Image: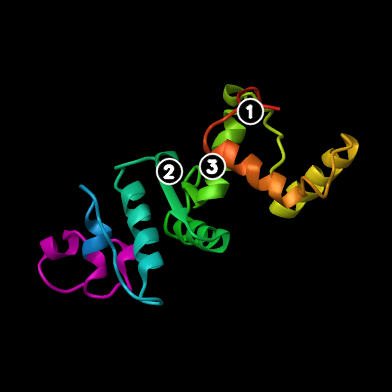
């Protein structure tokens, strides 16, 4: 190396900042207060977010398990986990990342007993729900013409959204 010996010990930018454009390091290095990253598709928002999370962990501003990142797709969450693991290879655990629904299910499974569930509860999609309601209507000899399964599912959804329990709904 050339130059005075002190230049050899000057702080170097972390390697995870390599390849960021002119504005992106500001978003990555801003760790106090809220931050909005607003940009078009394919402009590096995911890179900024994953680099920022890695920076926060590397700087000791938060532990990996203290970070929650919500994405729109599981594919995006998996990509982010991979990128962060590449930036911080010796990280003991990955931050909580996933879709709103996957994170909600993970929290529910961890604390299932608090809401009267078992941790191995099953989440039914809409088709499964309709199939189950049809089976219940048939088992209870309810007139399917008067109470179609989809209509009944809609009523159940309304009761659920209003926080009503079975004991709160009249027969």
In the picture, the disc for residue 104 is 3
Magenta-colored segment: predominant secondary structure: loop
Q: Is residue 85 magenta?
A: no
Q: What's the distance in space between the residues labelled 2 and 1, CA to CA?
A: 44 Å
Q: Height in image: 18 above or below 166? A: below
* SS at badge 2: helix
In the picture, the disc for residue 169 is 1
* Left or right: 88, with 156 as reference point: left
Q: Nearer the viewer, mark 1 or mark 3?
A: 1
Q: Nearer the viewer, mark 2 or mark 3?
A: 3
100 or 63: nearer the eye?
100
* Left or right: 99, with 51 as reference point: right
* Left or right: 100, with 122 as reference point: left
Residue 42: x percent and y percent? 40, 77
At 58% from the left and 34% from the top, the residue drawn is 108
Q: Does any portion of residue 124 appear in the rendered image?
A: no
Q: Residues within 10 Å of mark 2 (few under 14, many from 20)?
A: some
| Circle nearer the N terminus (1, 3) | 3
Q: Which residues are magenta?
A: 1-25
In the picture, the disc for residue 64 is 2
């Amino acid at each position: 190396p050339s130059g005075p010996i002190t230049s050899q010990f000057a702080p170097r930018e972390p390697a995870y900042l390599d390849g960021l454009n002119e504005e992106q390091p500001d978003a990555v290095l801003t760790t106090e207060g809220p931050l909005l990253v607003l940009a078009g598709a394919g402009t590096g928002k995911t890179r900024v977010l994953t680099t920022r999370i890695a920076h926060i962990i590397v700087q000791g501003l938060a532990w990996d398990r203290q970070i929650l990142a919500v994405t729109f797709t599981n594919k995006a969450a998996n990509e982010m986990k991979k990128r962060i693991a590449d930036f911080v290879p010796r990280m003991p655990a990955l931050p909580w990342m996933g879709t709103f629904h996957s994170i909600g299910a993970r929290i529910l499974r961890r604390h299932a007993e608090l809401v009267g569930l078992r941790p191995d509860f099953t989440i039914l999609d809409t088709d499964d729900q309709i199939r189950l309601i049809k089976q219940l209507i048939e088992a209870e000899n309810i007139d399917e013409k008067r109470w179609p399964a989809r209509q009944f599912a809609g009523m159940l959804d309304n009761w659920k959204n209003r926080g009503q329990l079975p004991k709160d709904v009249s027969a």
